[in-house]
Image (spheres, helix red, strand yellow):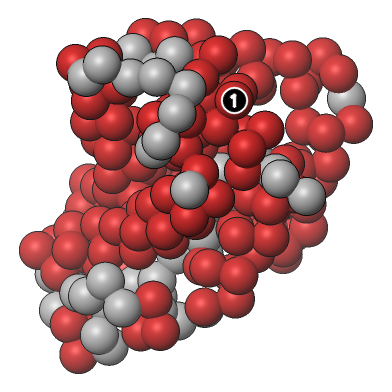
Amino acid sequence: MTFLVVLIGWVFSLCLHEFSHALVAYYGGDTTVKDKGYLTFNPLKYTHPVYSLLLPLVFLMMGGIGLPGGAVYIERWRLRGKQWETAVSLAGPFSNALLALILGLILQGMPVSSLGIWPGLAFLAFLQISAVVLNLIPLPPFDGFGAIEPYIPMDIRMKFAKTQGMLSWVVLILLWQVPFIGGLFWGLIGFLARLVGIPLQLAGLGLDQFMFW
């Protein structure tokens, strides 16, 4: 039960994340996202199904980190200003935060227990928080960098562009291998999770049940 709740819920949240990027881009001026099929919850329509779905699912099964999916391809030059570029980047993490808040309210308002769907929902909510925090790291290719990129001088942006494929792996290695950095990361996630009403003990149970192998 928990495995299916988390798996189905996480795929939905990945689709919601990508859809949110595309929806804001559409209203910001890039109407080509509609022609590309991004205004849908069909994961096969996204530009990078491997980065948007496969890798996040692999990392999810490796240990419960909400790895963000690869963003849909936005023609940023069509957007009406830097503010829209920032809004497009933040739309994805915002969708994860909203979903975490909704799940937190459900978990606080319902008679939850350690049985049924509740451990899975708690873990799924925790994953949304981890996706938000990871996504807002201000380094490429994360959305946090996309939000500030329009305001960075072009020469610096070009330097970052050359290393963005490597930087994501550097960040993940630091989170797993450097206790201080990992402690700060998971400590912030735990604080935010408690803030929105996610019972951490139940989320931990959900992780244990999800990792049944």
Q: Which residue does the numbered mark 1 point to in the structure image?
A: 205
Q: Residues within 10 Å of mark 1 (few under 14, many from 20)?
A: some
The three-letter amino acid code for the residue at tag 1 is Leu
Q: Is residue 82 visible?
A: no
- In this rendering, the answer to whether 114 lies above or below 117 is above
Q: Residue 179 location in percent, x, y?
A: 86, 18
Q: At 46% across and 37% down in the image, what residue appears?
A: 120
Task: Indicate left or right for 4 with 185 as reference.
Answer: left
Q: Residue 13 location in percent, x, y?
A: 37, 53
Q: Residue 101 location in percent, x, y?
A: 27, 26
Q: At 22% across and 75% down in the image, what residue appears?
A: 40
Query: Image quarter for residue 108?
Result: top left
Q: Nearer the viewer, residue 73 or 46?
A: 46
Q: Residue furthest bottom?
A: 35
Q: At 27% across and 88% down in the image, what residue appears?
A: 36
Task: Indicate left or right for 184 with 188 as reference.
Answer: right
Q: Residue furthest left?
A: 27
Q: Is residue 31 visible?
A: yes
Q: Nearer the viewer, residue 191 or 142?
A: 191
Q: Nearer the viewer, residue 39 or 13?
A: 13
Q: At 39% across and 38% down in the image, what residue appears?
A: 117
Label 1 sits on a secondary structure element that is: helix
Task: Indicate left or right for 43 with 105 as reference.
Answer: right
- In this rendering, the answer to whether 80 lies above or below 68 is below
- In this rendering, the answer to whether 103 lies above or below 50 is above
Query: Image quarter for residue 25?
Result: bottom left
